[in-house]
Amino acid sequence: MKELLEKIRQEALAMLEESDSLERLNDIRVRYLGKKGELTQVLKSMRDVAAEDRPKVGQMVNDTREALEQRLEEAKARIAAKQRELQLAAETIDVTLPAKRNKVGHRHPNTIAQEEVERIFVGMGYEVVEGPEVELDYYNFEALNIPANHPAKDEQDTFYITKDILLRTQTSPVQVRVMEKKKPPIRMIAPGRVFRADEVDATHSPSFHQIEGLVIDKNITLADLKGTLAEFAKEMFGPETKVKFRPHHFPFTEPSAEMDVTCFKCGGKGCRMCKGEGWIEILGCGMVHPKVLKMSGIDPEEYSGFAFGVGLERITLLKYEIDDMRLLYENDIRFLNQF
């Protein structure tokens, strides 16, 4: 028995000395100290040892177990220290190397265009006002001289939540809310997201942005409207830009007009961007309808005003010569990096 224990001890110690991984150490532990290990088998054979020799043999088994466990812990510490050294060597940081440059984002082309529009009108004394995207039917239609039987209220054109609540189709409701709460003079623009039940294509989307403006004061005329928008066009598209007004119809303005600007690509000569016409339609405008003023609590006999509305995406597409509106929302980094 003594020779067997000594043999087990020497074999195990030799294997522990040669081990170079924690996995190998675990295999040795199981082989010699596990439930079915060699030392356990020796203990199970104690019944074959004479009674007077059992205490001595038992002590020898315990001494062998303690020696193996101690050497096992030492081997674990040795291998762990070696692995730590290798890890530190592999992960050494060279502080002399240049740092990796972080990718920093920038403003979306829509945001760039909106901030430029805001800068122009704030410079003319306007304030920027925002309002709710989920709007009451009254503010989106009724207060803008659009009665219940108007085609614009068709459910195919508008996202209704309930009969009286909808996703706003324009930012004009912000103008109504301002007129109700503030006495003239009023000079404001209302940028924001709007919604319409349009199919997605190169020039349409069910969600897009508008910037609408409103001026209410005494003695405001169509000449003020034309002068203001002509100045805006020059600031936005260049000092040589000219404007043209064409009669149109909007329920909330009278008279109403569409405004065109000379093509800033060809200067009005005709090109692919303006489809050879030399002019590009840019916004709708008009003098605020007296009925709209009256419904908002403003006396149309004392005050008058003008309003206008422009699609933000339209400005962005024209300014940056983009031919597909969907590019603005696809989040393609190759496209956005150009701005």
Image: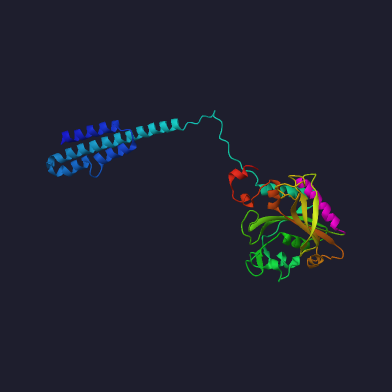
**Is 322 left or right of 118, judged from the image as shown?**
left
Q: What is the total number of numbered labels drawn onto the structure image? A: 0
Q: Quadrant of residue 71?
A: top left
Compared to 328, does 285 lie above or below?
A: below
Residue sitting at x 64%, y 57% = 207
Q: Does the rendering let one see residue 291?
A: yes
Residue sitting at x 14%, y 44% = 47
Identify the coloring. Answer: rainbow
Q: Say which of 231 and 60 sits in front.
A: 231
Compared to 169, does 9 lie above or below?
A: above
**Residue 223 highlighted magenta (yes or no):** yes
Q: Quadrant of residue 210?
A: bottom right
Give percent across and percent down for residue 284.
76, 57
The quarter in which the C terminus is drawn is top right
Compared to 17, does 119 lie above or below?
A: below
Q: Quadrant of residue 258?
A: bottom right
Which residue reaches farthest bottom?
149
Which residue reaches farthest top?
96
Q: Which residues are magenta?
A: 219-237
The quarter in which the N terminus is drawn is top left
Q: Say which of 338 and 216 sits in front.
A: 338
Give percent across and percent down for residue 57.
17, 38
Give percent across and percent down for residue 228.
82, 52
**Residue 312 highlighted magenta (yes or no):** no
Name the chief secondary structure element in magenta.
Answer: helix
**Is 258 left or right of 330, judged from the image as shown?**
right
Q: Does the rendering let one see residue 122?
A: no
Q: Say which of 204 and 75 sits in front.
A: 204
Give percent across and percent down for residue 8.
21, 35
